Amino acid sequence: MRVDLFDFDLPDERIALRPAEPRDSARLLVVNPHAKSVPDAESVLSDHRVGDLPSFLRAGDALVFNDTKVIPAQLEGIRHREGAGGQQVSATLHMRVGPSRWKAFAKPGKRIKEGDRIAFGHSGESCFLGSLDATVEEKGEAGEVMLAFDLSGPALDEAIAAVGHIPLPPYIAAKRPEDERDRADYQTIYAREEGAVAAPTAGLHFTPGLFEALDSAGIERHFVTLHVGAGTFLPVKADDTDDHKMHLESGYVSGEIAARLNAVKARGGRIVCVGTTSLRLIESAAGESGEIKPWAGATGIFITPGYRFKAVDMLMTNFHLPRSTLFMLVSAFAGFDTMHAAYKHAISTGYRFYSYGDASLLFRKDQ
């Protein structure tokens, strides 16, 4: 499909720079493509609050959360090369490939070469923050590099935590710097598996109180892990979706969770993914019959209109960028025309967009 079909105009003031307080007070746009055919049902689009979520679910349904934890993966440093002076560089880690090696997006990417040494913990005029050195082992396309750090395992993790910064999405970072509030705001309350560069933002809306309400309604909670990479922020530069290459993200679904979710489906319950990350992981783990299998590895699944969903029945997600792979995914899930109408409604009625913005609850169009 043509990528420009997924474009739309978003006023700058619709981009949220801070989350709602409390988190579950954010707005929730419910999108039900089947509402017109159901007598006495609400309209296709209806406005609510995230705290109303239990009223749209049934006892026996299961929410699937991504429990990845955001690390301070934005690193600033000085590049050193024999015969050349130092140069300030920035690197955003996006996928770990070994105890001491990370794939990263580096700037200025064109000037970095294989064999360069980078001393992280320095940023221009700033004081020395710590010691974390790496060698550029490989150089790929679009500024991607492979960094081999001098430290390994837990020692490397501790150094990254000491030196790094939370990599705020570019549409927020362009408007304000990261601060201490972001360390808490840009993390779900259930985050536990370190490795993400970006938060699974639909999960940012959940509070202990909302969890209690869901428990009282008989809604199950299950956790999978997909470490979100910086590739989630990259624009689709191709003119056609067939020419776009997704960046890989690593994750896993345990055998226990797969069995529990299959049991939910067997008794007539619905699988409700919180966030596109958990949806992409569940769909990667599902077979053609819809059975979810234990799964571990890297997924580059790219979902566009025409994709046949195998396991996921509902999706809670934030509002995404124009021309993005995530807007393509929600268009595949709830319908191309339906989602264009939903975003038009959201913009005109003041919904807040992107990572710190409001949420939507989507019913799958082909149920």
Image (spheres, grey):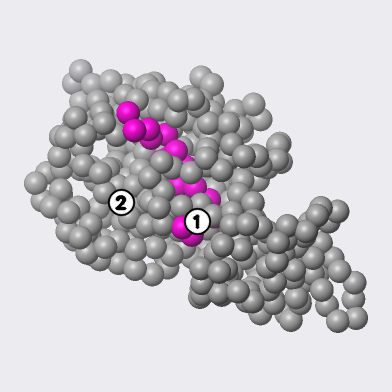
In this rendering, would 10 be left or right of 217? right
The x and y percentages for residue 80 are: 82, 73
Residue drawn at x 83%, y 56% as measured from the top left: 124
Q: How many marks?
A: 2
Quick check: is 215 in the magenta stretch? no
Please indicate, yes or no, whether residue 45 appears anywhere in the rendered image: no
User: Tag 2's secondary structure?
Assistant: strand
Residue 111 vs residue 88, the one in the foreground: 88
**Magenta stretch, residue numbers:** 194-209
**Residue nearest the observer in this picture, 268 or 165:** 165
Residue depicted at x 42% and y 34%: 205
What residue does disc 2 label?
Answer: 223
Residue type, label 1: Ala
Q: Nearer the viewer, residue 205 or 132?
A: 132
Q: Nearer the viewer, residue 63 or 101?
A: 101
Which residue is at a point 56% across and 43% down the rendered structure image? 183
Q: Please indicate whether residue 116 sits to the left or right of residue 308 in the image.
A: right
Tell me where residue 112 appears, x and y as whole percent.
77, 71
Residue 54, by quadrant, is: top left
| Disc 2 residue crowd, few under 14, some 14–19, many 20+, Cα 10 Å | some
Which residue is tagged 1?
A: 196
Tag shown at residue 270: none
Q: Is residue 198 magenta?
A: yes
Give neighbour class at mark 1: few <14, some 14-19, many 20+ (Cα, 10 Å): many
Where is residue 15 shown, x and y percent of the image? 60, 32
In the image, residue 223 above or below residue 14: below
Q: Position of residue 286 (x, y in %)?
A: 26, 61
Q: In this rendering, would 20 be left or right of 293?
A: right
Quadrant where the image shows the C terminus: top left
